[in-house]
Image (tube, coloured by chain):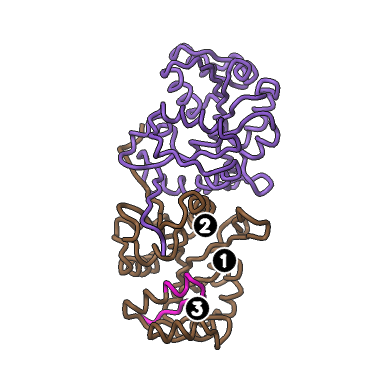
Chain colours: A purple, B brown
């Protein structure tokens, strides 16, 4: 599949590298066409690179791996025409560090960033996923032993199935993928990042993830 | 220990019942002195009941098991004099259902309800805990099999130790109790409730909880 990954930070490069290693034709998109990190990534991974617009035009599926506070501007730069009809995998978190630590989570109109992006690009099929964990775990869930989960939110069942297939190719067994429902459920996972940051503070630099553990029917 | 539990809803009665069964002298506090549910609870559990002020005066430790949107008013009714110097175990969540489902989480001044309560009652030692799970699991973690966690947040180490001892008496092994840090970390757990509600929607009426699963040191 031809996939655009928008964002050349650690998350974008990690996802793009994994997707390329799985045989996809990946274009890494950045603000400028001559981004040195993107060029290096393309050389190292047998992928392409270009502007956000170049990448979005080249991909049949688009991954938003930019910081949540700039995601809207990035998608506008990518262009509605290039996003139309495509699945947009949104892995971003809108954290506001302007007042220091802990950051606030920006919740546009009391909702989620994912819903805001969906509203701005109504003909794109937004799926929120992977935003609740470190990028190393995103593409290699076996780094964390035992049972743990990834969440999926979106309004389009077909798009969620397509994204779940990609998650499975990353190593997420189907029973580890929890479909939380429509895109408004992205509010729940976007609000998990403050806990992730606190746990990172407590646990230190280890890979970790959240597991949902269920028991028998409640009283 | 003499313990006041403020709030006669399901959470308050469940916690009060467990504490009474462990031998504590529990007073269940409600808005009025003649609350029928509180009277019934006291008769069934060998405890006492009374107004919020009666209960707070009678307890050496106070549990806030009221709805987060009314907790400030309840503690004002309980009275700063009766709360002074005591540990306040805050298990509440400030969910706003006024716009329907999913509810919004009220974050006073961009922070947490727990911090707001701490600020209003500076001589009380607020510890946030247990607010991330169903009340059945709070007092009987064995209902959910395997490894899962409870979080503790607070500015006073002694108060957190006292609360952790109570959690252990409920069945929480020490390694299941994660101290997230100072009371500002309550922001992280208060923002977990939207995920809890979505999971409840997906999983149905089963007992469940969140587990933090760790792997080896990160790259």
Of the image marks 3 and 1, the number of the one nearer the N terminus: 1
Q: Which portion, as a residue range, is magenta?
A: B1-15
Residue assigned mark 2: B190
**Both marks 2 and 1 on one chain:** yes
Q: Check disc 3: other Cα within 10 Å, few if <14, some if 14-19, many if 20+.
A: many
Residue assigned mark 1: B68
**Contact (CB < 8 A) between labels 2 and 1?**
yes
User: Residue B40, percent across and down?
Assistant: 46, 84
Residue in the image at 43% along x and 23% along y: A18
User: Residue B171, percent across and down?
Assistant: 30, 65
Residue in the image at 50% along x and 45% along y: A193
Judging from the image, mark 2 belongs to the subunit labelled: B
User: Residue A120, percent across and down?
Assistant: 70, 34
Which quarter of the figure is the C terminus of chain B placed in? Answer: top left
Of the image marks 3 and 2, the number of the one nearer the N terminus: 3
Q: CA distance from mark 2 to mark 1?
A: 10 Å
Quadrant in the rendering for residue A34: top right
Instruction: Tell me if residue B213 comes above or below residue B136 in the rendering.
Output: above
Secondary structure found at label 1 = loop
User: Residue B121, percent across and down?
Assistant: 54, 72
Q: Check disc 1: other Cα within 10 Å, few if <14, some if 14-19, many if 20+.
A: many
Nearest the viewer among A213 and A139 is: A213
Secondary structure found at label 3 = helix
Which quarter of the figure is the N terminus of chain B placed in? Answer: bottom left
* Direction from residue A76 to residue B66 in the image, left or right: left
Judging from the image, mark 3 belongs to the subunit labelled: B
Residue assigned mark 3: B83
């Amino acid at each position: 599949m031809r996939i655009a990954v928008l964002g050349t930070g650690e998350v974008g490069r990690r996802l793009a590298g994994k997707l390329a290693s799985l045989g996809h034709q990946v274009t890494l998109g950045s603000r400028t066409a001559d981004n040195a990190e993107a060029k290096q990534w393309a050389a190292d991974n047998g992928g392409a690179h270009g502007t956000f617009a170049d990448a979005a035009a080249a991909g049949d599926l688009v991954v938003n791996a930019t910081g949540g506070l700039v995601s809207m501007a990035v998608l506008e730069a990518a262009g509605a025409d290039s996003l139309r009809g495509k699945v947009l995998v949104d892995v971003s978190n809108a954290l506001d560090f302007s007042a220091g630590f802990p950051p606030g989570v920006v919740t546009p109109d009391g909702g989620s960033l994912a819903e805001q992006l969906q509203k701005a690009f109504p003909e794109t099929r937004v799926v929120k996923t992977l935003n609740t964990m470190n990028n190393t775990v995103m593409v290699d869930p076996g780094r964390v032993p035992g049972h743990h989960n990834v969440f999926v939110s979106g309004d389009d069942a077909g798009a969620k199935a397509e994204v779940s297939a990609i998650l499975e190719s990353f190593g997420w067994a189907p029973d580890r993928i929890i479909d939380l429902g429509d895109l408004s459920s992205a509010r729940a996972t976007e609000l998990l990042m403050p806990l992730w940051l606190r746990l990172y503070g407590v646990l230190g630099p280890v890979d970790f993830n959240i597991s949902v553990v269920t028991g028998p029917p409640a009283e």
